[in-house]
Amino acid sequence: MTRTTYRPRWVLLAFASIILLVSAADTGLAQCPEPPPYVLFPLNWPCPVIPTCSTQSGVCLWPNPGAPGQPCYCQAPNGAWIPGVIIRGVIIHGAPGTSPLR
């Protein structure tokens, strides 16, 4: 056999590997539900919530436009409204130097 007969096999193998890697990387976020607005989630909530209202008790999806640092509120399971501030993106909770009120 010549070298050219092996080339299509390697191309096919590389293409299949790339597809498997991309699909495996995508499954982590695919399991995250769309969070309802204002519902308070714990600080260790694994899914992205953007835009984010961050409180001392947790985070929630803020459905209104706003700049980081503006006040916002999340609703706790008992119906109480907890004050917080709008942040951009998601804080990785537990990482050194992070705070829910950044």
Image (cartoon, rainbow, N blue to C red):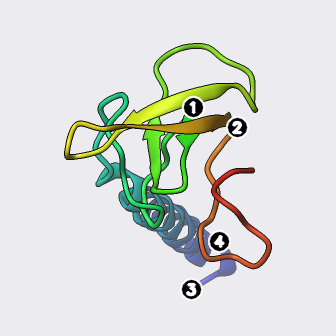
Measuring from the top left, give residue 37's x and y in whole percent: 35, 28
Residue annotated with mark 3: 1
Disc 2 crowd, CA 10 A, few/some/many (<14, 14-19, 20+) = some
The amino acid at mark 3 is Met
SS of the residue under disc 3: loop
Measuring from the top left, give residue 74's x and y in whole percent: 41, 36
Residue placed farthest to the top in the image? Answer: 65
Residue at 59% over, 68% down: 93
Between the C-alphas of marks 2 and 3, the distance is 58 Å
Residue placed farthest to the left in the image? Answer: 78
The amino acid at mark 2 is Arg
Camera-near label (4 vs 2) is 2
CB atoms of marks 2 and 1 within 8 Å:
yes
Residue annotated with mark 4: 4
The amino acid at mark 1 is Pro
Disc 3 crowd, CA 10 A, few/some/many (<14, 14-19, 20+) = few
Residue 94 left/right relative to 30? right
Number of numbered discs:
4
Between the C-alphas of marks 4 and 3, the distance is 8 Å
Camera-near label (4 vs 3) is 4
Within the image, what quadrant is residue 75 found in?
A: top left
SS of the residue under disc 1: loop
* Sequence order check, earlier mark of 1 and 4: 4
Query: 33 above or below 63?
Result: below
Residue annotated with mark 2: 88
Report the disc number at residue 51: 1
Camera-near label (1 vs 4) is 1
